[in-house]
């Protein structure tokens, strides 16, 4: 299949004007061919495919090799606010605002320190040196804006948070939005539970289908929706009810904690790391059994999107 794409994609681009009355854009191309946007972008950038098809010199963006990785990420994101920043720019965002940090990670996927960048302004300036990547990112973002997967909207939390209910985010963008990740610090990595002490909040990143290659026996927690608003979830394998974390869960309402859930069906989509859908906060704790891990049934404040619920519900 992959070898076939190397012929099919350039040939379709080359004959586009004869076959379609529409302008050749990323969105129109994906709609016409029904190809996986992630699979297409993991092989070449959109500009590279067009240059290859038309026999033109390939793009010479200075950060092409690094930034090509952002294009499949963008194709999987669904937050309109985040996507519009890629079509209209980031003017007006405060230097170290959560939004600006989230955009940095969506673009670069690395800390500023790793890239030799000390400010968001430097991050933006370096991005601006890559014209073909900017154009590709804008087209991909516009395609996603034109084809929303589910309705998203802001919700109120006890603290400011720009995340949109039911939008899809990478873990770095989630951590940036909640102040865990900064330009210089990526926040906790490789864990599904991230405490945010400053906000009295716990972030939970859930993968419903866990395969043995990606999850060890001690991290293959039994997390699944029981219904649209009831979620079976297991704590980390070392957590007991008597521990401070366990007590915070059991008494989260009295203690003023916010329990947030983000979920995805599988770890990857067409070879790219899958984003998490923001499910919102827990409303109640309905059941808690056992220790190491604690088996919990949560009632969510908002129903799980039907598209995710249908795939994630256990087979009877």
Image: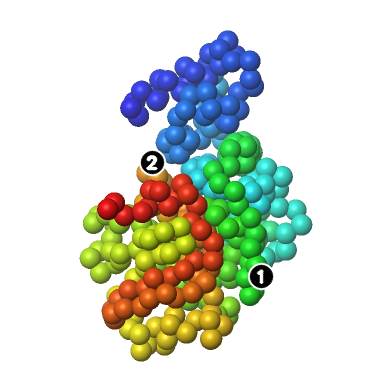
Considering every residue shown, the one lying at the far right of the view is 92
Q: Secondary structure at mark 2?
A: loop
Residue at figure coordinates x 44%, y 34% from the top left: 36
Q: What's the distance in space between the residues labelled 1 and 2, CA to CA?
A: 34 Å
Residue at figure coordinates x 40%, y 20% from the top left: 7
Residue at figure coordinates x 47%, y 49% from the top left: 306
Q: Which residue is mark 1?
A: 160
The colouring scheme, among rainbow, by chain, secondary structure or one colour, is rainbow
The N terminus appears in which quarter of the rendering? top left
Q: Position of residue 77 (x, y in %)?
A: 54, 48
Q: Which residue is mark 2?
A: 270
Q: Secondary structure at mark 1?
A: loop
Q: Position of residue 91 (x, y in %)?
A: 75, 53
- Where is residue 145, by image quadrant? top right
- Where is residue 227, by image quadrant? bottom left
Instruction: Name the foreground residue: 171 vs 222.
Output: 222
Residue 267 position (above or below residue 252): above
Crowdedness near tag 1: few (<14), some (14–19) or many (≥20) residues, C-alpha within 10 Å = few
Q: Nearer the viewer, mark 1 or mark 2?
A: 1
């Amino acid at each position: 299949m992959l070898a076939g794409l190397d012929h099919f994609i350039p040939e379709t681009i080359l004959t586009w004007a004869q076959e379609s009355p529409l302008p050749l854009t990323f969105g129109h191309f994906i709609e016409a061919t029904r190809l996986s946007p992630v699979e297409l972008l993991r092989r070449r950038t959109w500009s590279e495919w067009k240059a290859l098809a038309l026999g033109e010199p390939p793009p010479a963006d200075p950060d092409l090799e690094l930034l090509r990785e952002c294009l499949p990420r963008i194709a999987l994101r669904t937050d309109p606010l985040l996507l519009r920043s890629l079509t209209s720019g980031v003017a007006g965002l405060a230097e170290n605002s959560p939004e600006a940090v989230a955009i940095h990670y969506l673009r670069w996927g690395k800390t500023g320190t790793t890239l030799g960048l000390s400010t968001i302004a430097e991050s933006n300036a370096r991005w601006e040196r890559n014209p073909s990547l900017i154009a590709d990112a804008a087209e991909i973002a516009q395609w996603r804006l034109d084809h929303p997967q589910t309705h998203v909207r802001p919700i109120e939390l006890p603290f400011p948070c720009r995340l949109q209910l039911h939008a899809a985010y990478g873990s770095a963008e989630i951590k940036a939005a909640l102040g865990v990740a900064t330009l210089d610090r990526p926040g906790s990595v490789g864990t599904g539970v991230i405490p945010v002490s400053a906000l009295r909040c716990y972030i939970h990143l859930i993968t419903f289908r866990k395969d043995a290659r990606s999850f060890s026996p001690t991290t293959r927690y039994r997390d699944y929706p029981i219904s649209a608003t009831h979620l079976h979830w297991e704590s980390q394998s070392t957590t007991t009810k008597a521990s401070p974390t366990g007590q915070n869960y059991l008494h989260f309402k009295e203690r003023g904690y916010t329990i947030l859930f983000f979920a995805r069906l599988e770890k990857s989509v067409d070879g790219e790391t899958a984003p998490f859908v923001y499910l919102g906060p827990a409303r109640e704790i309905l059941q808690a059994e056992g220790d190491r891990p604690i088996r919990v049934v949560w009632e969510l404040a908002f129903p799980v999107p039907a598209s995710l619920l249908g795939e994630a519900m256990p087979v009877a």
